[in-house]
Image: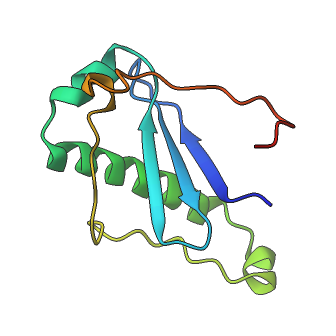
Amino acid sequence: TQRFDFIGHASAEHGKDILFFNLRNAPILVAIYGGSDYSEKVEDMHDELVVFECMKVLKKICSKAIEARDDSLRTRRQVDYTVPDWPIDYFVSRWGSDPYSRGAFCYVPPGVNG
């Protein structure tokens, strides 16, 4: 069973690419910056600025989805593309500077279970 959906944004500015994960069965959206020098800059940014940038990109993605949306899709499945100005809550990690992870991640190839 797939537990999340995702959508990405490729920025015109190098390194500002963001991948959004929507966890299913939970009102949680995770945003991850691409692995570049900009990710290191994000580590030093104030939490509110990081959230503001993510919300701005999310609004841009959703506004384009509204413009491109086919009306027939709307009748088959009601979709709400509205994005609030600010999230109910947020957490900005400092994953790259965390002494226990130091920005490391693992890769699990498709088909691997467990």
Q: Position of residue 11 (x, y in %)?
A: 45, 30
Q: Quadrant of the N terminus?
A: bottom right
Between residues 74 and 2, which one lies in front from this camera angle?
A: 2
- Report the number of discs: 0
Q: Residue furthest left?
A: 46
Q: Quadrant of the C terminus?
A: top right
- Residue occupying the point 75% across, 81% down: 77
Between residues 8 and 76, which one lies in front from this camera angle?
A: 8
For this view, does 83 lie left or right of residue 106?
Answer: left
Seen in the picture, residue 83 relative to 107 is either above or below; the reply is: below
Seen in the picture, residue 31 relative to 22 is either above or below; the reply is: above
Between residues 12 and 107, which one lies in front from this camera angle?
A: 107
Figure colour scheme: rainbow
Q: Position of residue 27 (x, y in %)?
A: 48, 72
Between residues 54 and 104, which one lies in front from this camera angle?
A: 104
Q: Position of residue 24 (x, y in %)?
A: 62, 67
- Residue occupying the point 74% across, 69% down: 70
Q: Position of residue 13 (x, y in %)?
A: 38, 22
Seen in the picture, residue 46 relative to 39 is either above or below; the reply is: below
- Residue occupying the point 33% across, 31% down: 95
For this view, does 65 lie left or right of residue 84?
Answer: right
Q: Residue furthest right?
A: 111
- Residue occupying the point 22% across, 28% down: 43
